[in-house]
Each structure stands twice: as C-alpha cells, then as structure tokens.
Image: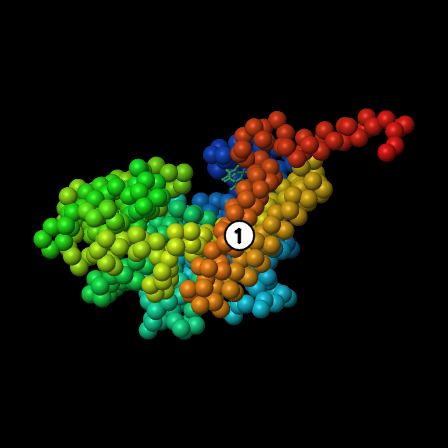
C-alpha cells in the first residue's frame, strides 16, 4: 500500500485547535480530533514548537515508542514526509535487542560463551505469553486456557519443570532432545519468561506446577502419577502446592491441617494460605498432620469440601493466590504420596527436578532459589535496557539525561551488578549441569543462597536507581528533586565554598 507523502511546508499549515498535524520520526500525524483527548492535554500540542513541526525529540522525551504502535494511535498517521525515512523501529517478537547490555553475552553479537548452544524460546514467550500476560496482569484473571494448550503443544509445561525423566519421549520446543535438556536450558527459559514483565502472570501460567508437581513425579503411585502428569502436561488441568498455613507460615514442621485415617483413605480438615494458583487449581499437593504426629503428603482433588478464595497480595491476582479450605474432604488411599507418616520427607524433597533424593531442611529450597535468581537477573537486565533507552531519549534543558555524569555513574553500577550476577549464575548453573544430583545440595545450596542474597540486594539497588531516572516512586525520594541531583547540588555548593587557604 502506498503511503501518502507531505512536504514540511504542508505540515506547517496545520497549527490550530481542531487542525493540528505533527511529525514524529518522518511520519505525519493528524492530531486534530485526538488533541481534545490527548492525556498530556491540548495546550502542549498547540505549542509553537510542536504544532505543524517535527516533534520527534519532544515526543520521545515524554512517551515510550510503543505508544505509536497502539492501534488507536497508529491510525493517526496520515503519511510520511517527502524525502524522509523513519529511523526508529520496534523490536519484532523473538528478535534480540541491539541496546548494549540488554542481552547476556551469549546472545550479544561479537561475544562468546563457554556454556550455551542455541535455544530459541523468546519467540514463543513474546508471541504467545506476552500479549495474554499484559491483559491479565491488569485484569487479574487467570491466563487463558488457550495459553495452557499452546504451552502443552510444545511441551513447555513439562520443560518448565527442568531437566529429568518427565521429559523422556517428548518433542520439545526448539527441537532440544529430552536427554540433552539441561540446567542451561532451564536457565534460558526462566530468563526469557521474565520478558513477560509480569511476575504474577508467569506464576499464574505455571508457578503451581513448578512446585506442586515434583512430589507427584517422585512419590505418587504410578497410576496416579501418570494420570496427573497427563492432565497437567496436556494443559487440561492445573496443580498447586498447599503447604503454607496462616498458623505455620512456611514452617512445614508446624502444619496443623489434619488427616484422619478412615476406611479406604483419609479425611482432611484445615486451611492453607498464600497458595499460588489455588483459586483455579484442580489438584492440591498438600502436607497434613497425621494421627501419629508426623505428616501425610496427599494429593487432594478439587471436589466436595474444597473451597478456594482469592487473597490480595502485592502482585496481580492473575497468579491465583488463594486461601484454601479443606472441610472434611475424603482423600482416597491411592492419593497418598510416599509412605504414610513420612510426608515431611516428601515435602522437603520437593523442588527436586529428578528422582527421590534424601533431603535436608537447609538445602530444600536451593533449586527454587536458583530459579528466582535466573528471573531476577533477567528482570534487572530489562531495567538496564529501559534505563539506557530513557537516558538517551529523555531531554532535559536541551540535553539528554545521559549527558549528566551522575546518571552515567548509576548506569555503570547497574550494568556491573547485572553482569556480575549473570556470570556467577552461569558458573553455578555449570556446576549444576555437571554435578551428580545428590552432590548439588551439598556443594551448591550455600553458593545459591549467597547468589540469591546478592541478586535481590542488587535488584533493590537497581530499582532504586531506575526510579530516579524515571521520575516515579518512591514519592519523596523524587518529589522536590531526585536524590542524586540534590546530592550533586549539595556537594557542588560545598566545593564552591571551600576556603582557598586549606590543604591536607
Ligand atoms: C502521535 C502523537 C501523540 C500521541 C499518540 C500521544 C499520546 C499520549 C499518551 C497515550 C499519553 C499518556 C502517557 C503514555 O502512555 O505515554 C501522553 C502523555 C503526554 N503527552 Fe502525548 N502524545 C502525542 C504527542 C505529544 C506531543 C507532540 C507532545 C509534546 C510535548 C506530547 C506531550 C505529552 C505530555 C506532556 C504528556 C504527559 C506526560 C506525563 O504524564 O509524564 N504528546 N501522550
């Protein structure tokens, strides 16, 4: 389709209320009708530097590029400027970013990595998960059923459980052979999933499976295991892990929910809180107190006596976080996981991607912590990319933010943090993929705990720096002058007042 072309002089004739044209990146926009509805107001568009002019710099100093890609604004474009070509393009789904440090080195042109072969997951994330994620991050609803089916089609649900025998015989996304799927594939998936920009949605689309299914893989009787695995891996049903109580928090040893032996099974009564995916899960992997004082690990199926209510958390309700009540629920014998009264072992061995391994309380969560590090570091990298873009396009007093040394110094710290965390993560992942499973807990639980500590501390520093660039929360830290700018102002004033007659 040919695009209409306008001369700069023609655009310059449209400068009045009800008749405003502007140019952004060689594209001509007719804002005549939109100007009344413009969230930034009419007057800024009527400004003599804007109406009828090339407003590219002013536009990118205030908006993200994606504003122009939204259908309702895209149609405001009526043509292009004669002799000019657009220079700014959005990255297509699956493509790599060209912004420095926006990709780990193994994905950056010109760099090498000792660790990775190619594995394409980004296209799936950006084409399938991102659009649905953006909708449900806002409306708080469960990810669409078609998303579970799409993930199932490429065995993504099974892959999100990490390497292990559950992948055997499956055709995996990216053509990876099941026996070759290792911790680095796992890392790539976790990091690419962070691109959805919605932690809650990622949890909603598989968080419960990640922690609720391993006990089934490892401890359920074959008939139950095969049925549940088929239901979950095919995207038909979902599972969650219910082991945190209002009374006990995450202290599984202190669980109060009770399971009483009856003919053919157990009767379960109790409540669980903060259960990810609980509002919609079909299966609940639980630990319940046994009459002998230990725990019974049971798979409870949604049915009579099972009630789930959403609870408010600090992230979106799309994760399906629930308060779960079991009221005299009958659980058949075949849904017992592992041995009776030995549920603590089942629960503490959880998060193992592979077979049954004796576990120790202090090492229990190391794999889940490793997964959190992957996602967290990837999110920090996204922040670095956003900040690099913003400081280059945002103009203050006629100069980009990046012209300020204090801004560049913050960026240097952000980049250093993310690169060091990624290198440490890759080293730990290399150990994971070369160590026998039973050795991992012994050698890696400590380093992963430290990596997690370093990563989350770094993320908080990076988030604090980033909001200074973007003029958003934390409220008082920016209102009345951003901390870094005020710090610089204070020191510069002190330096001006330095007496000439003092020396060390
Ligand atoms: C194609 C043209 C434009 C479209 C579609 C557009 C759209 C929008 C939208 C959707 C917002 C809400 C915030 C956001 O989503 O980023 C916004 C805010 C704003 N726009 Fe525009 N805009 C256009 C051109 C301009 C121009 C040329 C200026 C010139 C100065 C301008 C000034 C502003 C201001 C001051 C705000 C408020 C920003 C803030 O709250 O920080 N806009 N615009």
| Residue 47 percent coordinates (x, y) | 62, 33
| Ligand 1 contact, mark 1 (Cβ < 8 Å) | no
**Residue located at (42% from left, 64% from top):** 438
**Residue at the outermost front position:** 292
Q: Quadrant of ligand 1?
A: top right
| Quadrant in the rendering for residue 140 | top left
| Residue 152 percent coordinates (x, y) | 32, 62
Horizontal side of residue 262 vs 290, given as left or right: left
Disc 1 packing (10 Å; few <14; some 14–19; many ≥20): many
Residue 311 showing in the rendered view: yes
| Quadrant in the rendering for residue 226 | bottom left
Of residue 446 and residue 29, the one placed in the foreground of this image is: 446
| Residue 339 percent coordinates (x, y) | 23, 58
Of residue 477 and residue 164, the one placed in the foreground of this image is: 164
Residue 150 showing in the rendered view: no
Which residue is label 1 attached to?
Answer: 451
Q: Secondary structure at mark 1?
A: helix
């Amino acid at each position: 389709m040919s695009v209409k072309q306008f001369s700069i002089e023609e655009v310059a004739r449209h400068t009045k209320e009800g008749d405003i044209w502007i140019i952004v990146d060689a594209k001509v926009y007719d804002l005549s009708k939109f100007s009344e509805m413009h969230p930034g107001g009419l007057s800024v568009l009527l400004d003599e530097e804007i109406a009828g002019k090339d407003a590219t710099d002013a536009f990118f100093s205030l908006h993200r590029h994606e504003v122009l890609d939204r259908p309702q604004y895209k149609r405001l474009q009526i043509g292009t400027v004669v002799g000019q070509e657009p220079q700014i393009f959005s990255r297509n789904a699956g493509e790599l970013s060209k912004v420095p440090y926006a990709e780990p080195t193994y994905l950056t042109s010109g760099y090498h990595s000792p660790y990775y072969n190619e594995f394409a997951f980004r296209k799936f994330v950006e084409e399938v998960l991102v659009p649905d994620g953006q909708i449900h991050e806002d409306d708080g609803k469960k990810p669409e059923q078609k998303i579970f089916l799409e993930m199932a089609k490429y065995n993504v649900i099974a892959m999100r459980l990490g390497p292990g025998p559950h992948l055997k015989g499956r055709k995996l996304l990216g053509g990876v052979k099941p026996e070759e799927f290792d911790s680095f594939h796992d890392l790539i998936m976790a990091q690419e999933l962070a691109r959805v920009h919605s932690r809650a949605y990622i949890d909603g689309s598989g968080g419960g499976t990640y922690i609720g299914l391993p006990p089934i893989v490892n401890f359920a009787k074959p008939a139950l295991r095969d049925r549940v695995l088929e239901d979950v891996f095919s995207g038909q049903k979902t599972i969650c892990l219910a082991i945190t109580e209002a009374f006990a928090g995450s202290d599984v040893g202190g669980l109060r929910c009770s399971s009483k032996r009856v003919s053919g099974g157990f009767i379960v009564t109790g409540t669980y809180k903060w259960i990810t995916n609980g509002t919609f899960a079909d299966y609940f992997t639980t630990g319940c107190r046994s009459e002998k004082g230990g725990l019974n690990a049971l798979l409870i199926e949604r049915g009579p006596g099972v009630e789930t209510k959403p609870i408010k958390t600090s992230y979106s309700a799309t994760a399906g976080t629930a308060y779960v009540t079991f009221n005299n629920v009958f659980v058949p014998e075949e849904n017992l996981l592992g041995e009776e009264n030995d549920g603590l072992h089942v629960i503490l061995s959880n998060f193992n991607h592979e077979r049954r391994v004796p576990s120790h309380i202090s090492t229990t969560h190391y794999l889940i912590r490793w997964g959190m590090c992957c996602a967290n570091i990837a999110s920090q990298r996204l922040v670095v990319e956003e900040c690099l873009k913003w400081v280059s396009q945002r103009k203050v007093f006629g100069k980009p933010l990046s012209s300020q040394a204090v801004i560049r110094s913050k960026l240097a710290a952000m980049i250093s943090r993310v690169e060091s965390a990624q290198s440490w993560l890759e080293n730990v992942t290399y150990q994971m993929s070369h160590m026998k499973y039973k050795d991992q807990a012994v050698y890696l639980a400590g380093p992963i705990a430290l990596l997690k500590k370093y990563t989350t501390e770094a993320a908080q520093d990076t988030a604090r720096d980033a909001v200074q660039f973007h003029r958003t929360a934390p409220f008082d830290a920016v209102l009345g002058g951003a901390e870094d700018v005020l710090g610089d102002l204070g020191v510069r004033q002190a330096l001006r007042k330095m007496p000439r007659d003092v020396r060390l």
